[in-house]
Amino acid sequence: MRMLALGVDHRSAPTAVREALAFEGERRRAGLDALKDNAPDAEFVLLSTCNRVELYAAAEADPPDGEALAAFLARFHDVPVEMLNGHLVARHDEAAVDHLFRVAAGLESLVLGEGQILGQVRDAYKLASDCKAVGPILHHVFQRALRVGKRVREETGLDRGKCSVASVAVDVARAVFDRFEDKAVLVIGAGAMGELTLRHLSALRPGALLVANRDPARAHAVAAPWGGRVTPFDRLDDALAEADVVLSATAAAAPIVTVDRYAWIQRVRGNRLALILDLAVPRDFDERFKDFLDDPAGTNAKLKPGTILTGRIGRSKALAPASFS
């Protein structure tokens, strides 16, 4: 039995590379189908989240090697294979299994111990099973990984605290603003991440809680339980001008807000402080926002990797019992 885990995450690759390799929506199923067509005797699971894209391959003899899978990723996403050089990380056999266990337990996440990854691993495994891309090897490995992930969270206490990107976003907002009764909070996107974020942000009790989504019915369904106000998506500029905190998590294939567009909005806002947290992959806000938000006038704040990593510090002591040897 041989197994290979190949992929990128927030440590090995910049956002642009992770975005280029992301499998969104039906492309996940299409990717699994293409992998099976290329190697019908191998087993595959494809895990694609905000911060990682990983292929798990197994076979009784030899699964496709790292070079073949790298070529597949480049071909499927229509990017030059050279773009992946130095970013793809390959793990073999026991190292691949150990890595999967750590991923399922949240020990490899940007926010240490975050709660969503176990469900994302479960969903990836289920989809691969539905696509008949999984055989006895990966059935066994992924079922065990799900059990290990749950056990680590229960026995180390990782499941007792705030450990999602959405909950850390609230901590970041509290670090930027002292009060929220006079602030407007905007959530763009009403998918699972947007809904989770909205629930956490409602705890800030802001003066206004806005939701913008392309599907008005979905926006109303997500906003209603938390007293949110729905803004039509074609009036997003108005909502951005009103908002002090913006969290965006849509499934758009390209950025929905450009720097030029927001520069105009910021002038309308009177250049008051804005906290913009972009959780989408691919990103919702133009990549040029890095320079715009780091402007010397200090009129904007952004979510910095160093800031979000403070969510890891309080959990480090819980890791001692977590071992898969």
Image (spheres, rainbow, N blue to C red):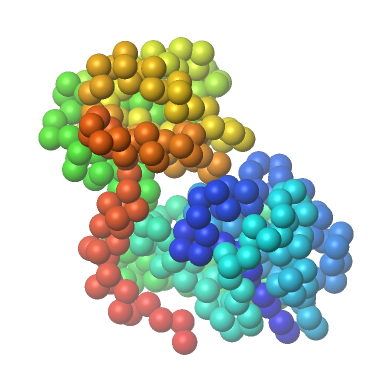
Residue 297's spot in the image, x, y percent? 23, 32
Residue 185 visible somewhere in the drawing: yes
Q: In this view, does 189 lie to the left or right of 60?
A: left
Residue 74's spot in the image, x, y percent? 73, 56
Q: Is residue 16 above or below residue 56?
A: above
> What residue sits 58% from the left and 67% below the top?
86
The answer to which quarter of the image holds residue 155 is bottom left
> What residue sits 72% from the left and 55% below the top?
80
Residue 78's spot in the image, x, y percent? 75, 48
For the residue pair 259 and 238, the one nearer the viewer reads as 259
Q: In this view, does 42 lie above or below 257?
A: below
Q: Is residue 224 above or below residue 21?
A: above
For the residue pair 125 and 9, the one nearer the viewer reads as 9
> What residue sits 40% from the left and 40% below the top?
290
Q: Hey, which residue is sitting farthest bottom in the picture?
A: 325
> What residue sits 39% from the left and 17% below the top?
264
The answer to which quarter of the image holds residue 24 is top right
Residue 324's spot in the image, x, y percent? 46, 82
Q: Is residue 323 left or right of residue 15?
A: left
For the residue pair 167 and 81, the one nearer the viewer reads as 81
Q: In this view, does 271 lie to the left or right of 10?
A: left
Q: In which quarter of the image is the N terminus?
A: bottom right
